[in-house]
Image: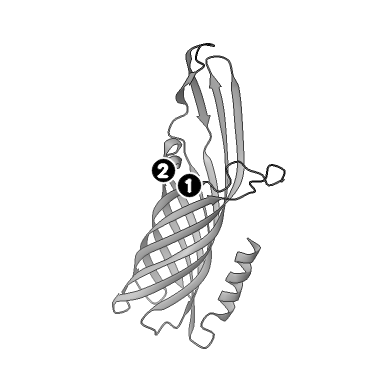
Amino acid sequence: MKKLIFVLLVALFSFGASTAQDNRISISPELNIPLGKLAWSYKPSMGIQLNYARIGDTDSKITKEVGFSVSYTSLAPLADTLYFVVDRGGVGGAGIGTAVYSSFKMIHFKGNFDFGVPIVKKKLALNFGFGVGYLQGIRDILFEDSFGSMDGVSENVAWATLVPKVGLEYKMSKNFSIATYLSYSIMIQMGSSDPGSLAYNEDTGKFYHYYTPGISLNYYF
C-alpha cells in the first residue's frame, strides 16, 4: 500500500510537467455486480465513488490522466438464510445446514491511469484505462446444521486489486461533463501462506471479481 501511494504521488507531480494542466473531481453512483464465487452469496448492490484526476496536455489528441479514487459498497446477501446438505454417512446420515451471511462491506482505494480519445471534436470522447488498488472487506458468516453443530467466520481482510475500465464522456460545458463507464475489478486476497505468520490466511491468493457499470458527474477546474 505504501509503495502504491509513493508511486502515485511521484506520477502526480511529474506527469506532464511542461504542458498545460487541468484537474477534475467526480462523483459516481455505480452498480457493483458480483461474478463467480462472489455471486453465489451476494446480489448486485449500489455503491458510490469519489475521484480526483490531474490531466496533462489538454490540447493533445489523446489526453492522459493520473489520479486516485475511493469507493464504498455494501453487497447484500442473496437471502437471509442459505441452505446446504450435511452428510455424516453412517454416523448420522444426511441433514440440512444453514448459512447466514451478513452484508459484505467493501471500501476500495485506487490509483488510476486513464486516457481519452476525442470522437466528436471536444464534445464526446472514448475513455479507457486501469486502476491499481487496495480493497478492505468485512463480513460475517454463521453456519448451523440439524445435528446441532454451529460455527462462525468473521472476515476483515484485504485484497489487492486491478481494475480495467472503458467509457464514454460527453462535455456539457468547459467545466462540466457526464460520463458512463464499465469497469472490471479483480480482487486478489492478501496475507501470508505461512501458518506461523501473524498475517496467515488460508485463503491467501484467492480471487474474487465483479464488474461495475456507473455514471460519473465531473467538474473540471
Q: Residue furthest bottom?
A: 18
Q: Quadrant of residue 35?
A: top left
> What residue is rendered at 60% in x and 40% in y?
155
Which residue position holds label 2?
36
The spot of residue 20 in percent (x, y) is 48, 85
The spot of residue 111 in percent (x, y) is 53, 65
Front position in the image: 48 or 148 = 148
Which residue position holds label 1?
208
Front position in the image: 83 or 53 = 83
> What residue is rendered at 45% in x and 24% in y?
83
Disc 2 marks a residue whose amino acid type is Gly
The spot of residue 53 in percent (x, y) is 50, 71
Quadrant where the N terminus is found in the figure:
bottom right
Q: Quadrant of residue 60?
A: bottom left
The spot of residue 137 in percent (x, y) is 57, 46
Determine whether the residue tagged by mark 1 lies in a helix, strand or loop.
strand
**Is tag 1's residue or tag 2's residue first in the polypeptide sequence?**
2
Determine whether the residue tagged by mark 2 lies in a helix, strand or loop.
helix
Front position in the image: 178 or 2 = 2
User: Is residue 92 left or right of 196 when viewed as pictured?
Assistant: left
| Residue 180, above or below 210 | below
| Residue 17, above or below 151 | below
> What residue is rendered at 46% in x and 50% in y?
47
Disc 1 marks a residue whose amino acid type is Tyr
> Which colour assignment does the render follow?
one colour
> CB atoms at circles 1 and 2 under 8 Å apart?
yes
Q: How many numbered callouts?
A: 2
Whether residue 171 is visible: no
Q: Quadrant of residue 196?
A: top right
Structural distance between the alpha carbons of marks 1 and 2: 7 Å
| Residue 69, above or below 101 | below
Whether residue 54 is visible: yes
